[in-house]
Image: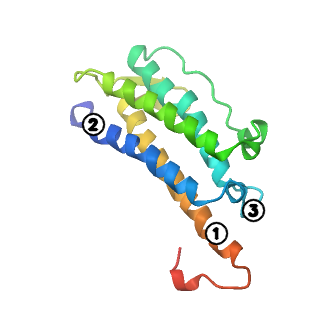
C-alpha cells in the first residue's frame, strides 16, 4: 500500500483505547486478587502478569514510541528488554488492584496526549526500525489498540481456564469450545 492510500481513523482508535482500559479493568476484576496470580502452566502469564505488562507497555512502549516518532522520527527509540520481564520485575508478586488502577491512570494520560494532537498530525511519519524497517506512527497507533485486544483475549482465556481449574473433576464442555 502506498503512502497515498494510507488512511487512519485516529478518533475511532483513540476511543477504543479509552474504552479498552475500562474493559481490561473489568475483565481483571472477575478474578479475585489471589486467583489473578493463577497460571495454567509455568510458561504462561497470569492475569496479574498480563496487567503488569499492560502497565509497563503504557509507560514504556506505545505512548513513548509514538510520541518519539511524531516529534523526531530519526531519534532512536528507547530499548525495551522483554526477555523474562515478568520474573525480573516480579509481576506476580504485585497487587492486582493497584496495578490496574495505575494502568488506568497511565491510559488516561495517554488518551489526553493523543487527543491533544492536531488534526493535521501526519500518521505516515515513520521511524526506521533496525529489525522491522519503517514503522509509521499510524502503525503504532493501530498496533496499540490491537495489543489491547490480544491481551483482553489472553485474560479471557485465563478466566476460561480458571473455571475448569476451580471445578476439578467437572467438565466445562457445556460452555462450548474455546
- In the picture, measured across the screen, residue 168 lies left or right of residue 5, that is right
Let me know if residue 146 appears in the view: no
Residue 17 drawn at (x, y percent): 40, 41
Q: CA distance from mark 2 to mark 3?
A: 39 Å
Residue 131, quarter of the rendered image: top right
Disc 2 crowd rating (10 Å Cα; few below 14, some 14-19, many 20+) is: few
Choose top left, top right, bottom left or bottom right for residue 82.
Answer: top right
- What colouring method underlies this structural image? rainbow
| In the foreground, 159 or 122 | 159
User: Residue 92, how many percent across, how many down?
Assistant: 74, 47
Q: Which mark is residue 11?
A: 2
| Residue indicated by mark 3 | 41
**Mark 1 to mark 3: distance in Å?**
11 Å
Give the quadrant of residue 86: top right
Of residues 127 and 122, the one drawn nearer to the viewer in this rendering: 122
Image spot of residue 160 (x, y percent): 59, 69
Amino acid at each position: 500500500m502506498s503512502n497515498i492510500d494510507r488512511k487512519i481513523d485516529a478518533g475511532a482508535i483513540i476511543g477504543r483505547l479509552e474504552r479498552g482500559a475500562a474493559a481490561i479493568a473489568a475483565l481483571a476484576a472477575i478474578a479475585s486478587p489471589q486467583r489473578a496470580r493463577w497460571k495454567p502452566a509455568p510458561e504462561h502469564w497470569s492475569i496479574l502478569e498480563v496487567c503488569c505488562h499492560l502497565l509497563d507497555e503504557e509507560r514504556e512502549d506505545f505512548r513513548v514510541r509514538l510520541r518519539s516518532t511524531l516529534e523526531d522520527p530519526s531519534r532512536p527509540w528507547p530499548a525495551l528488554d522483554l526477555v523474562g520481564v515478568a520474573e525480573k520485575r516480579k509481576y506476580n508478586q504485585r497487587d492486582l488492584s493497584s496495578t490496574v488502577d495505575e494502568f488506568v491512570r497511565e491510559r488516561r494520560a495517554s488518551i489526553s496526549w493523543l487527543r491533544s494532537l492536531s488534526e493535521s498530525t501526519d500518521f505516515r511519519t515513520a521511524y526506521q526500525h533496525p529489525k522491522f524497517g519503517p514503522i509509521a506512527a499510524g502503525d503504532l497507533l493501530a498496533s496499540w489498540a490491537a495489543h489491547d485486544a490480544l491481551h483482553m483475549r489472553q485474560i479471557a482465556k485465563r478466566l476460561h481456564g480458571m473455571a475448569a481449574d476451580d471445578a476439578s473433576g467437572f467438565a466445562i464442555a457445556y460452555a462450548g469450545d474455546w
